[in-house]
Amino acid sequence: MNVARTVVELREMLERKRRPGRTLGFVPTMGALHEGHLSLVRLAGQLDDVVLVSIFVNPLQFGPHEDFGAYPRDIESDLDLLEAEGTDVVFVPSVDEIFRRGALTTISVGPLGQVLEGEDRPGHFDGVCTIVAKLFNLVQPDHAFFGHKDAQQAAVLRRMVTDLNFSVDLVVGPTIRDADGLALSTRNAYLSREARMRALSLWRALEEGRRRLLSGHHIEVVEKTMWDVLASTDAVEPSYARVVDPDTFQTPDSGGSMLLAVAARVAGVRLIDNLLVDLRQPERGDETEGASH
Ligand code: AMP
């Protein structure tokens, strides 16, 4: 496994790895890797000849009062996990390396980046798009892999790729959960045992929301149900509980696919989760979507 810490090293390594007919799969991460991240690395290994993972805690996507400084970082353990997965190249740049000349030019995705997560975290998706665009330009992957756990992020990036004509196919892998339903997240590391139990209210809200939606309840009823599950749990402060169109994140048309999306602070830790419900095929969950888009 090759580890590049600078752009020059990355370019040299990619030059050696690239061959005509060999495809490159790219998995961008912020590190502190868990099975959710590793599932994307495995997906990349199934689809591509060369797998590149980046580890970069992107300051642009954190608000001024968010946890950029405290965000978990464990490079040594991350590199061991990636080596065990057979990753070819890992790109671990410093903040200075990436923003050597500042970040005057940024990307804004418009309305899709301003609802739900974008409303709660102003500027978040501009920060995500700006760094992902930079990484796409540096890596020039054939496929880039993202998790359905961050469904709005995937939708925003898909829109960016279309609008700005990036030559990359996005693949969205399913959300990996613990056995009790809690979606894996780097921020779960902040949770005490008790807070982790309360965090399960996000999954309970989604399951209850799905049940209501499938039994024909109106969207507003479903949203209220999910909100109430969160709000009635001790130490859980809901941010939103919404049913949206999975592409536009606006109110969905009746029928078809709907995304249930929740966010809450659990003992002060902000967590998000979502569940795709297909009203035509109720058994179809959030499986891998991708390369054809
Ligand atoms: P992060 O390091 O949190 O920026 O995440 C890097 C990538 O891993 C993103 O595409 C996330 O959506 C994805 N990811 C995070 N958690 C999970 C999970 N539980 N299941 C699947 N993918 C995930």
Image (spheres, helix red, strand yellow):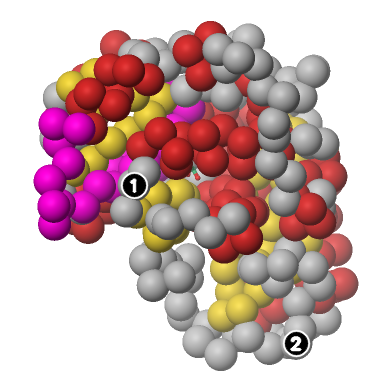
Task: Please say if 27 is above or below 281.
Answer: above
* Residue at 39 percent of width and 50 percent of height: 145
Q: Is residue 188 visible?
A: no
Which is nearer the eye, 130 or 53? 130
Question: Looking at the rendering, which quadrant does residue 62 occupy?
Answer: top right
Quarter of the picture holding the N terminus: top left
Task: Please say if 220 is above or below 58.
Answer: below
Q: CA distance from mark 2 to mark 1?
A: 37 Å
* Residue at 69 percent of width and 41 percent of height: 107
Q: Nearer the viewer, mark 2 or mark 1?
A: 1
- Relative image position of residue 273 (x, y in whole percent): 61, 50
For residue 91, side relative to residue 267 (left or right): left
Q: At label 1, which amino acid type do we have? A: Pro
* Residue at 51 percent of width and 34 percent of height: 134
Q: Are marks 2 and 1 in contact (CB under 8 Å)?
A: no
Q: At label 2, which amino acid type do we have? A: Ser
For residue 157, side relative to residue 4 (left or right): right
Q: Is mark 2 within 8 Å of ligand 1?
A: no
Q: Is residue 286 visible?
A: yes
Which is nearer the eye, 174 or 92? 92
* Residue range corresponding to the magenta coloring: 15-41
Question: Looking at the rendering, which quadrant does residue 61 occupy?
Answer: top right
Residue 141's disc number: 1
- Relative image position of residue 66 (x, y in whole percent): 73, 21
Q: Secondary structure at mark 2?
A: loop
Give the residue pinned by disc 2: 254
Q: Residues within 10 Å of mark 2 (few under 14, many from 20)?
A: few
Task: Please say if 273 is above or below 221.
Answer: above
Q: Residues within 10 Å of mark 1 (few under 14, many from 20)?
A: many
- Relative image position of residue 167 (x, y in whole percent): 42, 57
The answer to if 18 sits in the magenta stretch is: yes
